[in-house]
Amino acid sequence: MMERLYNPVFVKELKLRFRSFKSFSGLMFYLAVLVIFIAGFLLITTGFTGKGFFRPDTSFAMFSVLTIIQMALVLFITPSLTAGAISSEREKQTLNILLTTTQSSTQIVIGKLLSSVSFLVLMLIAGLPLYSLVFLFGGVSPSQIASIFLFYLLTVVAVGSIGVMFSTITKKTIVAMIATYGSIIFLGGITAFFFFITMAFSQMTPPAAGGTAQSFMAYFWAAINPGALILTLIEPEMGRGLKELSGVKLPVWVTYLIFYSGIMLLCLTVAIKKLRANMKSNR
């Protein structure tokens, strides 16, 4: 059983990644951004004196902004770790050698993805002590932080799958990176724009004239937006308000889970199918 689960590609990539100075410098940059924000927030709250009260509602505000900043950092870093997973091997002319081994296409793609996700998970875990300040001042429950980190993990794996797919179907790492960042911009920015546009049209259109369908589309655009999901997890009232406006009773996190799980499976399937097909066409 252990032999089937053992993935040499994952082990090799993990060792190379964690021995690299760039990995730890990236981790240091990530933590430095969080520390600077928290220190600045505390100084501003206490009037740059280091004294004063820090109420639970202020602690909750710090937690909310810290969560959004962490999501933005994760979305910014993930493509740089996954978009070159396969294309970099092709550029270094080592992909042919990798494909002549006994490793299947599934093992290669999954190993590349897991090695990148493992580093991102390390980043999230490294940031947990900073979140302990929230428990020190109160205002946030442990279950709320646990749910947010679980959806962080889902988002990282889904976006990482997109990066691996583009890395497989394109020949250049820069092209794969641009395509992955473009996908993130669509999921994070364009969907928010579509939500506001669709919501405005649904408010002007009577239900009998198609307003119900437009309200459903507004719910859908909000439900697949990572920022909107984080906001609904931070403030559940926003999720209930969205359900009342759209008329859709399904919780936002359920739609988000289904959609991004589907993206992950689709992208990994395409990457696995196209890995050796591309090599045959390049010979």
Image (spheres, helix red, strand yellow):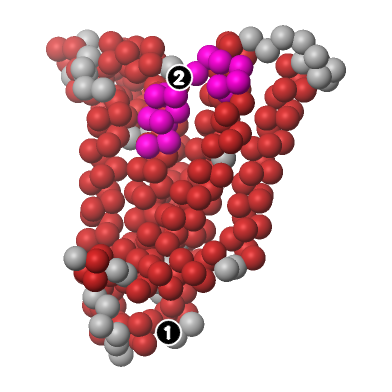
x, y percent for residue 71: 50, 38
Which secondary structure is most common in the magenta stretch? helix
x, y percent for residue 144: 42, 24
Query: Where is residue 198, by image quadrant?
Result: top left
Circle 1 residue = 94
Q: Nearer the viewer, residue 253 or 182?
A: 253
Q: On residue 136, which mark appears?
A: none
Q: Residue at x 59, y 60 (%)?
A: 23
Q: Is residue 147 magenta?
A: yes
Q: Residue at x 53, y 31 (%)?
A: 68
Residue type, label 1: Thr
15 displayed left or right of 183: right
The 10 Å Cα crowd at callout 2, few under 14, some 14 to 19, many 20 or more, is few
Outermost residue, right direction? 49
Element type where label 1 sits in the image: loop
Looking at the image, is 169 positioned above or below residue 264? below
Q: Which residues are magenta?
A: 134-150
Sequence-first disc among 1 and 2: 1
x, y percent for residue 78: 48, 52
Confirm whether residue 172 shows in the render: no
Q: Nearer the viewer, residue 268 or 210?
A: 268
Outermost residue, front direction? 2
Residue type, label 2: Ser
